[in-house]
């Protein structure tokens, strides 16, 4: 780590020293000033040590209170302004009308003419005083009714017209004009007591509403804030228990799918990982300590035998150095802060090729390849005394890259806390493991290729079915020969031979010879019927033998090298597959419905792999309908083009169906629901479909509702497109 990284940033307010664990400098931004900033800081200090449920309640109540107070102030202010504006407007309107009525009495100086107007003004709501003054400020006339307000005896001549607002009253000065000449001034004063009373009532109602709203908000918060605070509090309790007891088997309960639920799930996953690593670390530490103990004991015996003359020198540091130097495993001692090498043993010098002096100029991040220096620092700057640091890639002096398993232990070296690192070269082991993985992959490929034998098995089974028909035809022919009527001709010949001495009498009137022609005619008809039956059986036998030849020929074609992509019509592929699997469908009374137009575009596929897939699917469909009543066994095969440049072949059966929980596993290697199944048929079929650029999918509505498998095959490209490709 550079010096700049380990120092605080110069000139930054609130910069704190570097963290001992990461070496990063924590920079605290300068605190903003202002009322709201100070209020925020005070609120944080006040809520800092409180539980989260009280924080949520306090913050929510603070926001609600602020919103209610602000809305109350706005409403209260609006009502005050509205009341005063309405009162002023009404007072000005009445004053103008009264001033117009007072113009003529002022012109003639007749006060009696205006008294009725002033008395009418006193009847106006809240009016407590009214008076008309001359233009020079002398009083002109007043009402005869009782006046509550004390109006001035004389009016200042420079008083301005308009409304003047006081705390308890409002006065309006309206000039009485005759054209541009001022005749006098009308003064009307009203009381504001009712307005203030109304406003006090409004303020009381607002306060009551505020109190009730606060109570309701507090009650709702008491019930609802637990939705957020309870999972967090429970998570904090689990974390505290884990920290105190170091029990990583504890788990927090996930109650929701929101951010808190995600936090709980992540925390539980973290505990699981920590538990696994802790167990592995304990096991590795135990193994390492056992190995170190055994090796240390052995080395101590060797040192004792070689240096018996130095038994008095039992200095612990010297003894440790001898063990360190003579250890056959490469070992480093490095500084805890800088990760620089401060000592290396002879095995490390021999294994890495650096000299002792060269090693002491290096550090662990420098010789580590394909890893950021910060990642190396984080891996080894830990408070654990002993730990397994995992596998890393190191560079030797000759440039060779090796893979090493590092194990670190905290020790005191030269009076300073350091870490000793044991480097176990696992390059050959990992190479062997990679070779093993490659062999495993090849075995998997071989296992998948073994699934292709399913086609041959189906062909042999079909040959067996045809041989059954051949056997039946042969038996029929044998029975026909054994029961033939041709033996009766021998009886007629024997009868004629017995009467050959007197044939005229034998064939004469009343002789038995007269029955011979009729008998021969009947016998000829029976022999003709036998001959026709035998010809029919021989014809069927010939067809079956020809079918066997076709099946064997197709099997021979399939045995050829595969992998050649050719263009085929989908109907031709289906017909060929049905010729191989069709007899079994007939034997099991399966009704076949084929909908594949001959006008469908050709597909570019490996013929043998497509036949393997189709025969596998047809065979599975037939086997799925074995428990279905014979009248309900139906296999429907349809083919149609898709929107993404493929031809989809759907094979639907009316068999036992597939359970929903098995739909996602039917293509897994080794999975089968049949007692005699091997579990690689659909797996190999799906792989074969992918290899030729297509896909194989399966659906089912559930057990007893049949299943549908759809094979999508890529369309053949036009010749021009193939040349361009």
Image (cartoon, rainbow, N blue to C red):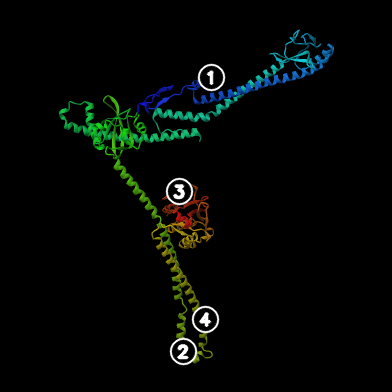
Q: Which residue is mark 4?
A: 522
Foreground: disc 1 or disc 2: 1
Q: Which residue is mark 1?
A: 35
Mark positioned earlier in the residue sequence (3 or 1): 1
Foreground: disc 4 or disc 3: 3
Q: Which residue is mark 2?
A: 499
Q: Tell me the CA gap for discs 1 and 4.
A: 130 Å
Q: Tell me the CA gap for discs 3 and 1.
A: 65 Å
Q: Position of residue 220 (x, y in %)?
A: 57, 27
Q: Tell me the CA gap for discs 3 and 2.
A: 86 Å
Q: Position of residue 538 (x, y in %)?
A: 46, 72
Foreground: disc 3 or disc 2: 3
Task: Identify whether 379 is placed above or below 572.
Answer: above
Q: In this orientation, which residue lies closer to the viewer: 585 or 370?
A: 370
Q: In this orientation, which residue lies closer to the viewer: 506 or 671?
A: 671
Alpha-carbon neighbours of circle 3 within 10 Å: few (<14), some, or many (≥20)?
few
Residue 665 circle label: 3
Q: Quadrant of the N terminus?
A: top left
Alpha-carbon neighbours of circle 1 within 10 Å: few (<14), some, or many (≥20)?
few
């Amino acid at each position: 780590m550079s010096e700049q990284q380990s120092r605080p940033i110069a000139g930054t307010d609130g910069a704190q020293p570097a963290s001992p664990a990461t070496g990063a400098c924590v920079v605290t931004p300068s605190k903003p000033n202002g009322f709201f900033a100070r209020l925020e800081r005070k609120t944080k200090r006040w809520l800092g040590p409180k539980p989260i449920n009280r924080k949520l309640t306090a913050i929510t109540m603070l926001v609600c209170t602020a919103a209610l107070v602000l809305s109350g102030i706005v409403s209260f202010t609006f009502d005050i302004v509205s009341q005063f504006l309405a009162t002023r407007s009404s007072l000005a309107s009445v004053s103008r009308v009264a001033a117009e009525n007072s113009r003529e009495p002022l012109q003639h100086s007749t006060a009696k003419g205006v008294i009725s107007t002033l008395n009418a003004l006193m009847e106006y709501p809240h009016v407590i005083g009214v008076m008309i003054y001359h233009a020079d400020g002398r009083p002109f006339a007043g009402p005869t009714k009782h006046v509550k307000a004390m109006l001035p005896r004389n009016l200042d001549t420079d008083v301005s017209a308009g409304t003047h607002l006081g705390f308890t009253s409002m006065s309006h000065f309206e000039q009485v004009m005759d054209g541009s000449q001022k005749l006098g001034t009308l003064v009307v004063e009203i009381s504001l007591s009712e307005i203030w009373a109304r406003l006090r009532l409004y303020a009381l109602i607002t306060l009551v509403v505020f109190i009730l709203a606060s109570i309701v908000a507090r009650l709702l918060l008491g019930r609802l804030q637990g939705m957020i605070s309870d999972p967090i509090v429970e998570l904090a309790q689990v974390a505290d228990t884990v920290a105190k007891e170091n029990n990583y088997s504890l788990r927090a309960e996930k109650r929701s799918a929101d951010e808190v639920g995600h936090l709980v799930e992540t925390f539980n996953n973290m505990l699981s990982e920590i538990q696994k690593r802790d167990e592995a670390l304990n096991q590795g530490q135990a193994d390492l300590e056992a190995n170190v103990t055994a090796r240390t004991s052995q080395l101590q015996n060797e040192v004792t035998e070689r240096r018996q003359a130095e038994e008095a020198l039992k200095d612990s540091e010297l003894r440790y150095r001898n063990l360190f130097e003579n250890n056959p495993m490469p070992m480093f001692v490095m500084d805890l802060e800088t990760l620089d090498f401060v000592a290396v043993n002879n095995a490390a010098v021999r294994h890495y090729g650096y000299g002792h002096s060269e090693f002491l100029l290096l550090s662990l991040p420098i010789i580590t390849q394909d890893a950021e220096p910060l990642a190396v620092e984080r891996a080894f700057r830990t408070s654990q005394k002993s730990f397994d640091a995992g596998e890393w890639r190191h560079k030797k002096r000759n440039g060779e890259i090796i893979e090493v398993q590092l194990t670190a232990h905290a020790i005191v070296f030269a009076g300073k806390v350091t870490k000793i690192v044991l480097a176990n070269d696992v390059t050959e082991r990992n190479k062997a493991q990679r070779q093993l993985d490659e062999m495993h992959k090849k075995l998997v490929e071989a296992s998948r290729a073994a699934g292709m034998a399913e086609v041959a098995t189906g062909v042999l089974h079909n040959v067996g079915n045809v041989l059954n028909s051949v056997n039946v035809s042969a038996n029929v022919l044998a029975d026909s020969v054994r029961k033939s009527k041709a033996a009766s001709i021998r009886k007629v010949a024997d009868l004629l031979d017995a009467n050959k001495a007197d044939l005229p009498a034998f064939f004469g009137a009343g002789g038995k010879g007269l029955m011979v022609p009729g008998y021969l005619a009947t016998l000829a008809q029976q022999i003709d019927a036998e001959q026709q039956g035998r010809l029919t059986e021989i014809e069927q036998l010939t067809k079956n033998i020809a079918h066997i030849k076709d099946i064997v020929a197709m099997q021979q074609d399939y045995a050829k090298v595969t992998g050649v992509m050719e263009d085929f019509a989908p109907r031709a592929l289906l017909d060929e597959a049905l010729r191989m699997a069709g007899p079994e469908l007939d034997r099991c009374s399966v009704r076949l419905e084929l909908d594949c137009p001959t006008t469908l575009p050709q597909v570019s596929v490996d013929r043998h792999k497509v036949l393997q897939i189709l025969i596998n699917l047809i065979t599975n469909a037939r086997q799925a309908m074995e428990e279905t009543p014979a009248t309900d066994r139906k296999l429907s095969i349809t083919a149609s083009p898709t929107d993404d440049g493929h031809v989809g072949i759907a094979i639907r059966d009316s068999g036992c169906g597939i359970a929903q929980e098995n739909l996602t596993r039917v293509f897994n290697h080794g999975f089968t629901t049949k007692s005699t199944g091997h579990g690689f048929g659909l797996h190999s079929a799906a792989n074969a479909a992918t290899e030729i650029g297509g896909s194989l999918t399966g659906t089912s509505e559930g057990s007893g509702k049949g299943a549908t498998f759809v094979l999508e095959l890529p369309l053949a490209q036009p010749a021009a497109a193939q040349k361009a490709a």
